[in-house]
């Protein structure tokens, strides 16, 4: 249970889905997409076409960083480190 909580993020997903807190799996913002995992990264990829190259990379890297941080929290819970 503590490991699963590690995948939750207080900020939620970017945009209009801030109510959705799970960073590993969830519904995509683009319902034509078949991806149901890493919704923040999938959203950053699909929304990146309207941004400059630098902003696109920054948005995608930020979402990858958020997922990495969530995985570290879950791994810490599995190891018994509850920080």
Image (cartoon, rainbow, N blue to C red):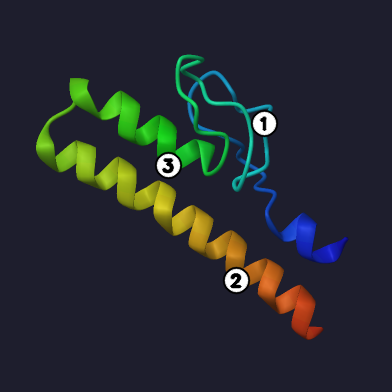
Residue carrying label 3: 41
Give x and y (percent) for residue 63: 42, 47
Q: What residue appears at the point 51 percent right and 20 percent down from the top-left corner?
A: 29
Choose top left, top right, bottom left or bottom right for residue 59: top left
Secondary structure at numbered mark 3: helix
Give x and y (percent) for residue 3: 78, 65
Choose top left, top right, bottom left or bottom right for residue 53: top left
Alpha carbon of mark 3 to alpha carbon of mark 1: how far?
14 Å
Circle 1 residues within 10 Å: few <14, some 14–19, many ≥20 = some
Circle 3 residues within 10 Å: few <14, some 14–19, many ≥20 = many
Circle 2 residues within 10 Å: few <14, some 14–19, many ≥20 = some
Quadrant the N terminus occupies: bottom right
Residue carrying label 1: 20
Give x and y (percent) for residue 20: 67, 31
Residue carrying label 2: 72
State yes or no: discs 3 and 2 in contact (Cβ < 8 Å).
no
Q: Is residue 39 shown to the viewer in this render?
A: yes
Quadrant the C terminus occupies: bottom right
Give x and y (percent) for residue 12: 61, 37
Q: What residue appears at the point 12 percent right and 31 percent down from the top-left corner?
A: 52
Question: Which label belongs to residue 49?
Answer: none
Left or right relative to 39: residue 22: right
Q: What residue appears at the point 20 percent right and 24 percent down from the top-left corner?
A: 49
Q: Earlier in the sequence, mark 3 or mark 2?
A: 3
Q: Is residue 60 above or below residue 83?
A: above
Left or right relative to 1: residue 76: left
């Amino acid at each position: 249970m503590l490991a699963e909580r590690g995948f939750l993020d207080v900020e939620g997903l970017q945009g209009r889905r801030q109510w959705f807190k799970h960073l590993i799996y969830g519904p995509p913002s683009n319902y034509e997409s078949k991806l149901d995992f890493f919704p923040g990264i999938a959203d950053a990829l699909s929304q990146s076409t309207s941004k400059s190259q630098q902003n696109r990379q920054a948005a995608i890297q930020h979402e990858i960083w958020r997922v990495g941080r969530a995985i570290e929290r879950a791994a810490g819970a599995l190891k018994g480190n509850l920080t």
